């Protein structure tokens, strides 16, 4: 909805994926497993199918077994997934950025062992950053990795971890020294070889996928399982945030777009006072505002992706995209419920689910307020902390 500039190849990729998602995925996540946890075997089967369209596989170059798509094309495909199912977009997002980390900074023995399974859709990764008392401020991470000969012994707790119940392995951010900035290190924990405890978290939405607590008790990991170099965990984490925020913006965009599509369809079918409700001025005005905000969100999101692809720093632009698109999703989904009237609060219509999902997306990868602080710092050079 709304014109999008795409190359012929991009349009073909989007169209093919959209047909598949409509036929095969929408019925699973929005009817069969609506608000119910999708078992790992079923989720893995879906991820294997998506890999053929360039989801996860697209973010890694052909020399490492991926499809080597540019970031903007990858984002266009991701938007289609998010518009079909925000639940499904979560493992796609996490596996994609796990694949990027393995591709860019993992030692060869870990990359060669774990990357192929991510690209094929066979395996799942979790990224263990957030803790019970640690959200946006990565410097406060408390999970400790203590050196013991050729190994590290890890103790701590992670929370709000996507893919936790599905995960085959975990990239865990740990404190290896008391230095605030150079004391964080990433470790790869194989769930079978370095067992960690996982407990699911039930939420107001996005319950068809896994969000978990992870408990690490004397987990013994070889030193050779460090991702990147010791002490570079903060730098490596922050370098990913710029890109991942753009993809969370695309999650918001996908939810907003689907809410607009559902509201438009309903408004052209529902009749009141002798005509379809789309013919009433206030409904038309609401749809116009919703459509304008969807397009504005897409322009901000695609701009940030294009800057990243071009190698241009985009910290402020990524924050703007994440801030605007995710808040727009909340407003647009709320308006879609209003257009549906009483039907909008029933589980018979999708907008009820979209409204609950929209409330969530302004929170991960830095809340709306954190994005505002990033934008303010970029404009003034004055930090809030």
Image: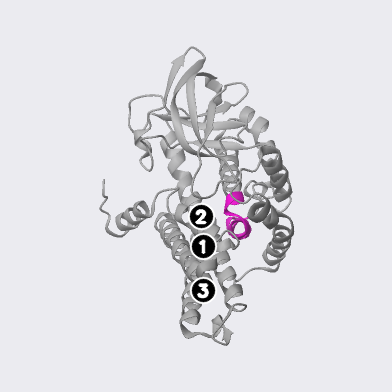
Tell me if label 2 and label 3 are in contact, CB under 8 Å: no
User: Circle 3 sits in a helix, a strand or a loop, which is it?
Assistant: helix
363 shown above or below 131: below
The secondary structure that most of the magenta stretch takes on is helix
| Label 1 sits on residue | 345
What is the x, y in percent for residue 6?
63, 68
User: Circle 1 sits in a helix, a strand or a loop, which is it?
Assistant: helix
User: On the picture, is 232 further left or further right than 31?
Assistant: left
The residue nearer to you, when weighing 117 against 232, is 117
| Label 3 sits on residue | 291
Q: Give the range drawn in magenta.
A: 70-89
Q: Residue at image x 51%, y 55%? A: 357
Q: Which of marks 2 and 3 is nearer the N terminus?
A: 3
Task: Report the quarter where the N terminus lies.
Answer: bottom right
Q: Distance between the residues labelled 2 and 3?
A: 19 Å
Residue 302 visible in the shown view:
no
């Amino acid at each position: 909805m709304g014109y999008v500039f795409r190359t012929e190849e991009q349009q073909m990729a989007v169209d093919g994926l959209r047909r598949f998602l409509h036929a095969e995925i929408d019925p699973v996540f929005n009817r069969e497993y609506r608000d119910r946890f999708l078992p790992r075997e079923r989720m893995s089967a879906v991820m294997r199918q998506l890999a053929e369209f360039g989801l996860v596989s697209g973010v890694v170059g052909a020399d490492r077994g991926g499809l080597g798509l540019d970031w903007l094309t990858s984002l266009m495909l991701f938007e289609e997934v998010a518009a079909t199912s925000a639940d499904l977009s979560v493992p796609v997002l996490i596996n994609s950025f796990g694949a990027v980390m393995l591709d860019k900074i993992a030692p060869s023995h870990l990359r060669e062992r774990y990357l192929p399974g991510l690209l094929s859709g066979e395996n799942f990764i979790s990224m263990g950053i957030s803790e019970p008392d640690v959200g946006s401020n990565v410097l406060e991470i408390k999970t400790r990795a203590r050196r013991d000969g050729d190994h590290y012994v890890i103790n701590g707790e992670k929370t709000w971890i996507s893919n936790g119940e599905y995960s085959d392995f975990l990239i865990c951010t740990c404190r290896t020294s008391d230095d605030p900035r150079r004391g964080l290190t990433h470790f790869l924990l194989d769930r079978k070889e370095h067992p960690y405890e996982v407990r699911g978290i039930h939420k107001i939405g996005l319950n068809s996928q896994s969000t978990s607590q992870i408990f690490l008790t004397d987990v013994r990991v070889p030193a050779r399982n460090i991702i990147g170099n010791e002490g570079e965990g903060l730098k490596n984490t922050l370098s990913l945030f710029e890109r991942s925020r753009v993809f969370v913006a695309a999650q918001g965009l996908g939810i907003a777009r689907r809410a607009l599509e559902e509201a438009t369809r309903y408004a052209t079918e529902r009749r009141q006072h002798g005509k379809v409700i789309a013919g009433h001025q206030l409904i038309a005005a609401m749809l116009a505002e919703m459509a304008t905000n969807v397009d504005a969100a897409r322009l901000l999101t695609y701009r940030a992706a294009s800057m990243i692809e071009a190698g241009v720093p985009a910290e402020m632009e990524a924050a703007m995209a994440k801030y605007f698109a995710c808040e727009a999703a909340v407003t647009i989904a709320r308006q879609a419920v209003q257009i549906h009237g009483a039907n909008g609060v029933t589980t018979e219509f999708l907008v009820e689910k979209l409204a609950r999902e929209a409330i969530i997306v302004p929170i991960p990868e830095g809340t709306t307020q954190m994005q505002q602080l990033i934008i303010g710092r970029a404009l003034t050079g004055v930090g809030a902390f």
